Image (spheres, rainbow, N blue to C red):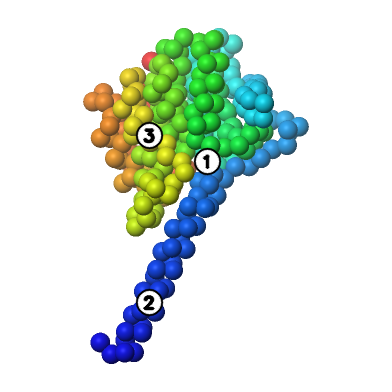
Amino acid sequence: MSSRNKKIVFRWIKVVTFLYLFIGISLFFFQEMFLFHPVKLDRNYRYQFSFPFEEVDIPFTKTDTISMVKFYPADSVSRGVVIYLHGNKGNINRYAKFAANFTKHGYEVWMEDYPGFGKSIGTLNENKLYQQAEHIYSMAAVKFNKDQIVVFGKSFGTGIAAYLASVKACKQLILETPYYSIPDLFACYAPVYPTSSITKYKIPSYQFLQQVKVPITIFHGTDDGVIPYRCAIKLKTVLKPTDQFITIENGTHHNLNDFRLFHQKLDSLLAR
């Protein structure tokens, strides 16, 4: 190899090394910016929905307050409650429209905002996400029996939902577009990095699901560009023989609610 070619190769090695380190450092220091996209609301903000609801402020610690909205069925008698753990974007306003999927079956829907989302106050970390979900469950358990409590997770919230169902008794666990774990999700995008070491949030859904005793149903679309289907399908390996992994052909991360199959299966689960 000539001296000139050696210089070119060495230059490219430096460029590739720089890019590798730059992206890796960015993933480490800015991962919360990649992972969370909250929309905050003023504490005086008042929700407006066209169906029955109640806004609840829940003191959690001296510095943290959980903002939650309870959506009610038209019938004044509730058959149970769905603890709804939403995704990583926006706030309750973004997900409120999905409450009708459950209230039409007579379920209340309790939807919390994570710290820093909507009107919830506090700092965000993995343990607190688990603890706040357990706190919501404890409130629900005062009013409802365990076989009246459904745990539902959407996108980012699926990991928190899986954790909750692994430590608390409920009727069933339903997950929409889940992930295997946060490090695994990062690895789907950046497989050349040691994501298990650099991710601050772990949320090992695959471990939690192995501890869930109640029926589990998973919905995932084949065209999901946020949590790729090839990554989510690995969860099938930890499911019980009686659990369901329902594939929505051509479904994306954001449109499963538009598919008839999604509603047919969900209605069947909630009618039991």
Q: Amino acid at mark 2?
A: Trp
Instruction: Judge by depth and name the residue closer to the eye, 145 or 248.
Output: 145
**Residue at point 47%, 58% (across, down):** 25
Q: CA distance from mark 2 to mark 3?
A: 39 Å
Q: Earlier in the sequence, mark 1 or mark 3?
A: 1
Question: What residue would you read off at disc 2?
Answer: 12
Q: Kindly identify which residue carries mark 3.
A: 205
Q: Residues within 10 Å of mark 1 (few under 14, many from 20)?
A: some
The residue where tag 1 is placed is: 88
Q: Position of residue 72 (x, y in %)?
A: 58, 19
Q: Quadrant of the C terminus?
A: top left
CA–CA distance between discs 1 and 3? Answer: 16 Å
Q: Mark 1 and mark 2: span between their CA atoms?
A: 37 Å
Query: For the point 63% across and 42% down, which residue is it?
Result: 39
Residue 272 appears anywhere in the view? yes
Instruction: Give the secondary structure at mark 3.
Output: helix
Secondary structure of the residue carrying tag 2 is helix
